[in-house]
Image (tube, rainbow, N blue to C red):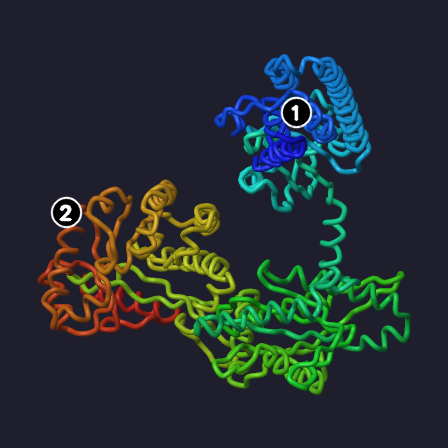
Amino acid sequence: MLVEDWADIIRASLLAGRCGSCPLWDARQRTRSLLMIYSFPAWRFSGQVPPASDFARAFVAHSGSMIHSLCQAAAGHDALICLQGMALLPSSLEPLSGYLLFILIFLLGYQQWRLYRFRQEAAKREELFRIVAENAADMIALVDVKGRRLYNSPAYERILGYSTEELAKTPALDQVHPEDRFRVLEAAREARRTGAGKRLHYRIRHKDGSWRVLESTASAIRNAEGEVEKLVIVNRDITERQRSEEKLEHDSFRDPLTGLPNRLLFLNRLQHCFARAQRDPGYRYAVLLLDLDGFRVLTEAMDADAGDQVIVEVARRVEACLRDKDTVARPTTKLPTNDTLLPRSGGDELAVLLDAIADPVEAMRTARRIQTAVGKPITVRGRILELSTSIGIALNAAGLQRSEGLLEDADRALHRAKALGGSRCEVYDEGMHIRAVNQLKLESELRTAIDCGQFPLCYQPIISLASKQVVGFEALVRWRHPEQGLVPPSKFIEAAEDIGLTISIGKQVIRQACTQLRVWQHAFRCPLTITVNLSAKQFAHADLVTDVRAAVQESHIDPSRLQLEITENVIMADPGQAVDLLTQLKHIGIGISVGDFGIGQSSLSWLRRFPIDELKVDRSLVSSMLTDRVSCEIAGLIVTVGGSLKLKVVAEGIETAGQLERLGKLGCTLGQGYFFSPPVEPERAEQLLREQNLRKAIGAG
């Protein structure tokens, strides 16, 4: 075989090793192919063994490739393969063994040098990482897959106050805000799954107990099998940045002078109310526009700084008049809408959004509160100023097409208020305006009536059905209106309850009734009783027992002759509390009557527990007992129950002789109604008592 043939064989052997899957495998394969050439080449099967000299010359000719392969093998820790290869060389190649041994020694030395360089570079990289981590402004942490800390950079102590030892003793998740822990865990799972975590903002506890906001990213470190075994987490403290962003957002939606919402935020909230009204036809809201009367003159007389002080104080007072869900804004700029400008807005104007109001009266009532608050004196630079304000009110209506339309309506109402002289409220809708004004007028007149004692009592006689004698009276309040005369309760009690006047009115009624009872007891020497009705609010009032005791003591009456009537539904609203309160009244000696009995929810078991003296059959049962069998049976049952419990039973609303006759057959002993007498003034009641005494005297004579 020629030298060229040997060269081709060696070249083929070297090339054959390149089919491997990696460079290290290629080097190992080429080395095996070259050094073990006698073990498996094709010519061994042909029986032609080439001379050693030919192989040597070919080897020397291609020693460069041989050395390169051996270097790759040695660098890949395959020195053992080289030794195995040398052992397979035939004796005819022994002169080359020294040469190969030299190459092997050289390669082993090269391998150790490469390993040294690798370790040196790794140490440099580790030192570089340490320097970067320790001097980085961000906090860098290394954690394992279970979240345990393996390394924390010194920035943790500088930013959060914790030393390395303190961090090692505390689980990382314990320092995270409870509301953010789930998101942190989810971000860690995502980083382990994908190898890269998403940017995350969360709160972490500082050593002083405050919370810092961190921006965090995570990267995964994988082992040789490709599994995530560690996470590198980089945290940046963005607390100050977030505060700046929040301040910027706040300033974008707030008036810089007063801190109130500006026009942009006000319109946003107005749009929410408009959208809600579109979904819910029963939802009502209102807009109030306020303008300080004479504000321009004030600023000209003083200066702009004084005007700013006034605006700030007025804004504070208006806020105090509103509920938490309402909005007061200072709309100091104009915004274009549908090629028009929204209502003008000067520096002295405020806008109020009343959310979820019950009726138009509530808007008018709020406006009056604002006017009262703003009208109180304001001291600016030692000067006492008295201000007034004009207010335009607009309420949402079914035909409203856009949210800003309500602002325009309120602005028109404000213009009208200013045109009429200022210092007044005007409602855009005429019908609502009239009703709201009338209601407010009624409320104002009721307060005046209390101060002036304009609530006299009328008295309806309670008659013994057997003897037809007056045994008592029910005191019924009336309002002696200076223009309308006596006004029945049906026209003012509801308004009085809405503004909380029933307690004051009820207290006056009890005192008047006690005083009148004292007069009649002295004048007629008869055992009369007077029944006074209590409203639900009176019955729940904490001072009821005290007020009743004071009225009884001041009038020096026999407390058993005063009877308080409470409706069945009021008592059953809270039976346990009712028992306690009624017991306290009974200790004073007061009689207790249950009104409207038979139409409520009471049960006989509770009735036995109530310390009561009298049941009143409701007038609806009395009026229908002649035509409705059920009503008649219920009335009879009440009479029977009253008798079994030794209670007096009074039938209310007797208007016909037939009703009187039927009640007599049922065993009812007392009654009242227009059949006997309507409610009368004290003078007429006294006349009835005199006539009764006269009949008694004639009968006795």
Against 74, residue 407 (above or below) is: below
Say whether residue 279 is visible.
yes
Q: Residue 55 has which mark?
A: 1
Residue, x 17% and y 62% (percent of image)?
Answer: 467
Towards the viewer: 356 or 614: 356
Q: Residue 33 has which mark?
A: none
Against 388, residue 15 (above or below) is: above
Q: Residue 644 has which mark?
A: 2
Q: Amino acid at mark 1?
A: Phe
Horizontally, residue 280 falls left or right of residue 69, namely: left
Say whether residue 231 is visible.
no
Quadrant where the C terminus lies? bottom left
Towards the viewer: 270 or 464: 270
Task: Name the spot of residue 56 as percent of width and height, x first.
Answer: 69, 23
Horizontally, residue 68 falls left or right of residue 461, namely: right
Secondary structure of residue under mark 1: helix
Q: Amino acid at mark 2?
A: Ser
Residue, x 64% and y 71% (percent of image)?
Answer: 267
Towards the viewer: 58 or 406: 58
Neighbor class of circle 1 (other Cα within 10 Å; few <14, some 14-19, many 20+) is: many
Is label 2 or label 1 in front? 1
Quadrant where the N terminus lies? top right
Tell which circle, 2 or 1, labels the residue nearer the N-terminal end.
1
Neighbor class of circle 2 (other Cα within 10 Å; few <14, some 14-19, many 20+) is: few
Q: Label 2 to label 1, Cα distance in Å?
A: 137 Å
**The quarter of the displayed image where residue 95 is located:** top right
Towards the viewer: 202 or 66: 66
